[in-house]
Image: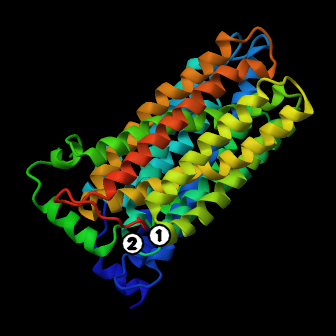
Amino acid sequence: MTIPAIATRTRLRPMSVCLTSAQDYFRAQGSKWRPALVVVASFIIVFTCCGLIFAWGVYQALYERLAREPGTPFTGASPAEIDLIGTIAVSLMTIGAPFAVAWAKRFTPSTVAFVGGLIFGLSLVLASFGTALWHFELTQGFLNGIGTCLSYMVAVTTAPTWFTRHRGLAMGIILSGTGVGGLVWAPALNACVVRLGFRNTLRLTGGLSFALVSMASGAMAWEPSNKARIDTENSARTSRADGILKVPLVDWRVAKSRKFVAQALGAVFQSAAYYTPVFFYASYAQTLGYGTTASSNFIALSNACNAIGKIIIGHLADRVGRLNALFITTLLSAISAVAFWLPSTCLGETTQSQGLFITFTVFYGVFASAYVSLFPTSLVELFGAQNFASVNGVLYMVRGMATMVGTPVGGVLVRSTASNLGPETFRNMSLLVSALLFAATAAVLWVRLEAMVGPNGGVSWKWLQ
């Protein structure tokens, strides 16, 4: 069947005129390439939106430097106040998950992703005109987070439904976009800021990100059997507000289960810790004696390890069990924080502390990021495909709320001990991150044990889960 033939049979939907040909092609049933196209498009969305957020450390270090200069929008602002911009963005990326998922079911995934790309690009352009700190919190923080949420949640919710056996690998590839994006965006942003200034850099990335996300949004679609179930739900709606303002939450029988409680606790502890080192890599590297360019390379190094780790660990998880991989990688991320980052804060500006921090950057990039890719795949196994969308939305919302608390607290700890600009000012932050990651490890172990309990209370000794 040709593309024009498909288009004549497909009813056009609102806000999809410019995407008609692509959407009609992607909706063609039975195409063996559809899962691959969904993976590629999801990767582009994650590469763009999340990649720029993971490169936030470039702006964090830049804005902190501007805070020490007179006459800038950030003059006098503390690291914690500046960090709030990135924290708002990364928190809203998942806090709005239930709404993003519900709207993708109520309308279409492609429409929601397209709107997200539009808001994301607009947020960066508007930020370029900011003259006060709160302008950046509103645009580069609040609006940027909303735009990311609408696009990102569509990608991570629709993509897993297309896979069974290779779900871990597929999500590893998709979510490696955060690492690849950070690897590309961090040095690119640093170079653009030097040559164009940060305002023109914001405008350039705003336009480019809208173009990339709008192009990828045309491939976003539900897997056919899931789409049939969603169409049935939509036909049963009793009002226009249902599915727009009234968002379905998790079934109470699922929410009160021990598995759900354990998974929620793991999500809280891990997300409260996860983004803190990512946002402060460049700032901390500068306390060790690195220059502006060299410190931004730590962000790129971390994101390179992030991308490699998600793909390799995602592939291995399909073989050794996704819950097993989730536990092992969370434990190793906790060990890397307490064994490498914490000691580096105690040794001052020395070659040894630099070596420890480089080691931490590599290990944390590989293992901590694996949680992000393994998290949605574990939900399908724990709660079933029929509950995946609602559970995924609520638990991502929980992750966003925890990030909103954990990362600012880490920033405050830096300020509260900052009698100078040495690495010791980050010691309390590293202790907090280490403690939270060990707590997340304990919660993931609880999840793994609960997964062995059958519906009748019996224990199933199936280890490859």
**Circle 1 sits on which residue?**
38
- In the displayed structure image, the side of residue 406 where residue 94 appears, left or right: left
Marks 2/1 in contact by CB < 8 Å: the verdict is yes
Where is residue 309? Give x, y as percent: 64, 58
Residue at left 57%, top 60%? 44
**Residue 131 in view:** no
Where is residue 255? Give x, y as percent: 23, 44
Where is residue 33? Give x, y as percent: 47, 81
Image: 390 above or below 381: above
Q: What residue type is disc 1 on?
A: Val
On residue 265, which mark appears? none
Residue at left 41%, top 32%? 401
Q: Which corner quadrant holds the C terminus? A: bottom left
**Circle 2 sits on which residue?**
162
Instruction: Give me the C-alpha separation between circle 2 and circle 1.
Output: 8 Å
Q: Which corner quadrant holds the N terminus? A: bottom left
Disc 2 is placed on an element classified as helix
Disc 1 is placed on an element classified as helix
Residue at left 32%, top 52%? 450
Q: What residue type is disc 2 on?
A: Trp
Of mark 2 and mark 1, the one earlier in the sequence is 1
